Image: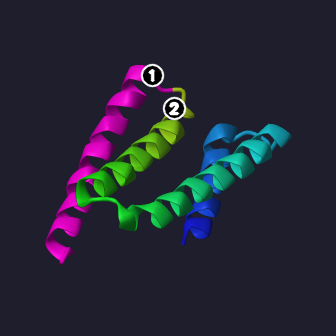
Amino acid sequence: MPAIGGIVYGFWTSGIDRHSGPITGWNVLLGVVSAVVFAAVAHGIHTVAPRLPREARALAWAVFAGIAFGFLYSLTDASILKSAGHSLVIAAGVFAVVFYRYYTTED
């Protein structure tokens, strides 16, 4: 699953960075690097998360989602404050949902 997410994230990253212009080597490189980093971090969280308490697991996924969203949003030439603000909202939402899931399904 992290590999598929990484591929989608990489395509999305390169598409946003193009700004509807021609495809360049920079777009391709940014997409590939973003895909590899996204997949590696997602795989790492999937590997480590089962050993963490539910609060830390939820926090790990929230931080990952917030950073991933913030990076994509920053490629749209939005301000740093706007990117950070939206990222915090996304991270808070992910934390709430993931914590609830782990809280209600943990033995």
Q: Position of residue 83 (x, y in %)?
A: 42, 30
For label 2, the SS is helix
Looking at the image, residue 33 lies above or below residue 77: below
Q: Identify the image quadrant of residue 49.
A: bottom left
Residue at figure coordinates x 33%, y 57% from the top left? 57
Residue at figure coordinates x 41%, y 49% from the top left? 65
Q: Main secondary structure of the magenta part?
A: helix
Q: Position of residue 47 (x, y in %)?
A: 49, 66
C-beta proximity under 8 Å, tags 1 and 2? yes
For label 2, the crowd category at 10 Å Cα-Cα, with few meaning under 14, some 14 to 19 and many 20 or more, is some
The amino acid sitting under disc 2 is Ser
Q: Is residue 19 visible?
A: no
Residue at figure coordinates x 24%, y 53% from the top left? 55
For label 1, the crowd category at 10 Å Cα-Cα, with few meaning under 14, some 14 to 19 and many 20 or more, is few
Q: Is residue 88 visible?
A: yes
Q: Nearer the viewer, residue 16 or 93?
A: 93
For label 1, the SS is helix
In the rendered image, which quarter contains the C terminus?
bottom left
Horizontally, is 56 left or right of 73 in the view? left
Point out the stretch of residues depicted in magenta.
Answer: 78-107
Q: Position of residue 14 (x, y in %)?
A: 68, 46
Looking at the image, residue 28 lies above or below residue 106: above
Query: In this figure, which residue is indicated by the disc labeled 1?
Result: 80
In the rendered image, which quarter contains the N terminus?
bottom right
Q: Position of residue 85 (x, y in %)?
A: 32, 30
Residue at figure coordinates x 55%, y 54% from the top left? 41
3D distance between C-alphas at marks 1 and 2: 7 Å
Query: In this figure, which residue is indicated by the disc labeled 2?
Result: 74
The amino acid sitting under disc 1 is Ile
